[in-house]
Image (cartoon, rainbow, N blue to C red):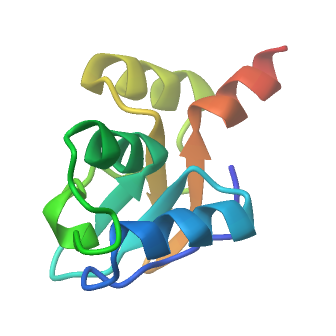
């Protein structure tokens, strides 16, 4: 799990989110809203592919809302199965607060 959680405002532009991902070397950002959301590098690519202006499109327009989360003690196999079943690449780890993020890259690195 990665513990360096990076957040972005839902009002930030997709271009700002992309710059933040590049600066922090991450592929997903948490978006703090009523229910936490997530914006991923795939969302950035989709924005461009759909011919939307990344500098004008807000993160809130492309993010996934109300994402699935897991507790800190989740087994790696459970997290991997969830990700496979749900077709997702990132799972925020939540205790009383957000403590990290499990990514498909983390799982691949662990089993290699």
**Residue 51 found in image quarter:** top left
Q: Look at 27% across and 26% down and name the residue there.
A: 86
> Height in image: 85 above or below 13?
above
**Residue 65 found in image quarter:** bottom left
Point out residue 59 in the picture as x, y percentages from the top left corner.
27, 69
* Horizontal relation, residue 35 to residue 42: left or right: left
Note whether residue 95 is visible: no
Nearest the eye: 17 or 80:
17
Nearest the eye: 90 or 58:
58
> Height in image: 73 above or below 96?
above
Q: Look at 33% across and 45% down and name the residue there.
A: 48
Point out residue 26 in the picture as x, y percentages from the top left corner.
65, 56
> Height in image: 80 above or below 17?
above
Q: Look at 72% across and 68% down and name the residue there.
A: 24
Q: Look at 45% across and 80% down and name the residue there.
A: 97
* Horizontal relation, residue 101 to residue 22: left or right: left
Residue reaching furthest to the right: 112
Note whether residue 22 is visible: yes
Point out residue 5 in the picture as x, y percentages from the top left corner.
60, 71
Point out residue 66 in the picture as x, y percentages from the top left corner.
18, 59
């Amino acid at each position: 799990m990665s513990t360096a959680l990076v957040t972005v405002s839902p009002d930030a532009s997709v271009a700002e989110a992309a710059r933040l991902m590049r600066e922090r070397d991450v592929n997903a950002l948490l978006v703090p809203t009523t229910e936490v959301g997530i914006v991923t590098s795939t969302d950035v690519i989709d924005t461009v592919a759909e011919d939307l202006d990344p500098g004008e499109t807000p993160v809130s327009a492309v993010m996934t809302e109300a994402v699935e989360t897991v507790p800190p003690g989740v087994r790696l196999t459970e997290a991997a199965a969830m990700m496979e079943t749900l077709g997702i690449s990132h799972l925020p780890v939540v205790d009383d607060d957000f403590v990290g993020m499990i990514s498909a890259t983390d799982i691949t690195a662990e089993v290699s």
